[in-house]
């Protein structure tokens, strides 16, 4: 019995508490809906055929879509929220040893549920994407930082920008997260191959700074990223992080586990910079520059803007895609979601390159069967070109501003 309980505890610990809470809430709403339509004590719909299960699940999805199962009146839920609720219900089935109720007799996602979710997607209100910030915003952020607290806040954000950090890696954010907030011990400085101590008076002259991310969103542990110093007096990862670290280690209560978002107030208490706090000041900098210079308004900036800005900065500088993925700790082509094609410089010189080879010779396939022609292989890219593009196209999905 001890092994059974230990196994259950391990499964529960595989996800953060907020994920477990969402699962429990979806299952509770599902049972509430079943009771509302006269079904009780048959939570797994054992008395119903597969087709009827699909229709009941579809009805449940619609109730979720309209927000009728929420305690507060809400606007229609987005399709992804409806899908998440449906997936959580299916997970409850599987945890109880039942078959996935979403699947048809061919073990594929039921057609009527597919079409219903597709219909929701087609009527979803478009999400506003968080704008990729540039170095100009960082400089304005610093210019407007008058107090020591303002400067510390700005320096933390600039440091996060260079390492394409998620907000929960350097700020206090709402809700439990799997990602661990960085502390002093995670930041190391090197002069060539020699590691410097945090108290070294020449720390700001280090040749590189390395940050180890102990735990990340997708389960990767102890991932170390290194950046080298620049000649810029402000936008330099080494100089910025040396300021942050040497400020914090002077605090009376500081130790190796003190988080990087710590700031000592005049009354002797430690203040932790939060996402809401930082975003207010970041938007103030964008407002100071104005939409005529930036092309966007402050409310279009979010906490993802640093991560998106880092990806965009590397792309515009010609950094290879695989390097962007590694430095930004993207495990797949998901980083493409952070590349903003609406940035004017995104397509710089592309049109000129498109006319460099006006004439080219095509070596046709030796045999082109009718089957291939029917499958759309009437071009030089081959029958699987469209399928090869799908992952790239799906990567360009909007990120919601929180």
Image (cartoon, helix red, strand yellow):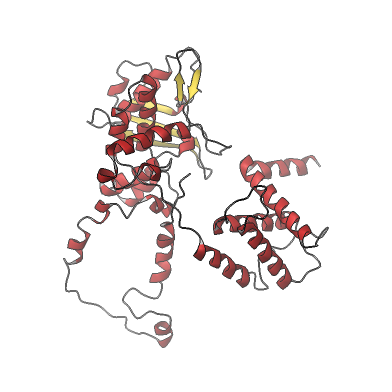
Q: Where is 42 relative to 358, above or below?
A: above
Q: Residue at x 41, y 27 (%)?
A: 187
**Picture mark count:** 0
- Residue farthest toward the bottom in the current orientation of the protein: 370
Horizontal and vertical percent position of residue 256: 48, 21
Q: Residue at x 54, y 67 (%)?
A: 118
Quarter of image, res 193:
top left
Viewer-nearest residue: 366 or 31: 31
Viewer-nearest residue: 168 or 99: 168
Q: Residue at x 60, y 58 (%)?
A: 82
- Residue farthest toward the right in the current orientation of the protein: 41
- Residue farthest toward the front in the current orientation of the protein: 73
Quarter of image, res 114:
bottom right
Residue 193 makes an appearance in the image? no
Residue 268 makes an appearance in the image? yes
In-image side of 122 versus 25 (left or right): left
Q: Quadrant of the N terminus?
A: top right
Quarter of image, res 203:
top left
Q: Residue at x 81, y 67 (%)?
A: 47
Horizontal and vertical percent position of residue 197: 38, 19
Q: Where is 33 relative to 401, above or below?
A: below
Q: Where is 237 relative to 21, above or below?
A: above
Viewer-nearest residue: 173 or 276: 276
In-image side of 77 versus 384 (left or right): right
Q: Where is 27 relative to 391, above or below?
A: above
In-image side of 274 versus 54 (left or right): left
């Amino acid at each position: 019995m001890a092994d059974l309980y230990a196994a259950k505890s391990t499964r529960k610990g595989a996800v953060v508490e907020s994920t477990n809470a969402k699962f429990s809430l979806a299952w509770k709403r599902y049972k509430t809906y079943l009771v509302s339509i006269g079904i009780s004590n048959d939570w797994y719909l054992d008395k119903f055929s597969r087709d009827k299960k699909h229709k009941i699940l579809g009805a449940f999805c619609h109730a979720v879509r309209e927000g009728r199962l929420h305690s507060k009146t809400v606007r229609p839920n987005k399709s992804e929220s409806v899908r998440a609720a449906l997936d959580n219900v299916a997970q409850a089935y599987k945890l109880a040893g039942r078959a996935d109720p979403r699947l048809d007799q061919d073990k594929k996602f039921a057609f009527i549920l597919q079409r219903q979710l597709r219909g929701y997607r087609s009527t979803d209100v478009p999400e506003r994407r968080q704008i990729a910030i540039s170095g100009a915003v960082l400089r304005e952020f610093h210019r407007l930082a008058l107090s020591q607290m303002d400067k510390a806040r700005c320096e933390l954000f600039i440091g996060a920008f260079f390492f394409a950090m998620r907000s929960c890696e350097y700020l206090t954010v709402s809700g439990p997260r799997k990602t661990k907030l960085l502390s002093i011990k995670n930041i190391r400085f090197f002069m060539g191959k020699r590691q410097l101590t945090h108290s070294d008076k020449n720390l700001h002259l280090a040749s590189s700074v390395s940050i180890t991310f102990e735990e990340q969103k997708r389960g990767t542990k102890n991932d170390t990223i290194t950046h080298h110093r620049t000649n810029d007096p402000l936008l330099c990862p080494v100089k910025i992080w040396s300021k942050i670290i040497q400020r914090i280690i002077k605090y009376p209560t500081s130790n190796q586990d003190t988080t990087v978002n710590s700031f000592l107030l005049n009354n002797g208490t430690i203040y932790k910079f939060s996402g809401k706090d930082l975003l207010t000041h970041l938007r103030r900098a964008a407002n100071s520059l104005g939409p005529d210079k930036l092309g966007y308004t402050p409310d279009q900036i979010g906490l993802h803007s640093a991560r998106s800005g880092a990806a965009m900065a590397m792309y515009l500088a010609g950094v290879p895609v695989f390097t962007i993925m590694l430095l930004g700790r993207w495990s797949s082509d998901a980083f493409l979601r952070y590349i903003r094609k609406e940035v004017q410089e995104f397509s710089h010189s592309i049109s000129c390159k498109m006319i460099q080879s006006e004439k080219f010779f095509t070596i046709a396939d030796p045999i082109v069967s009718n089957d291939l022609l029917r499958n759309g292989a009437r071009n030089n890219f081959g029958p699987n070109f469209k399928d090869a593009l799908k992952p790239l196209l799906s990567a360009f999905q909007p990120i919601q501003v929180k």
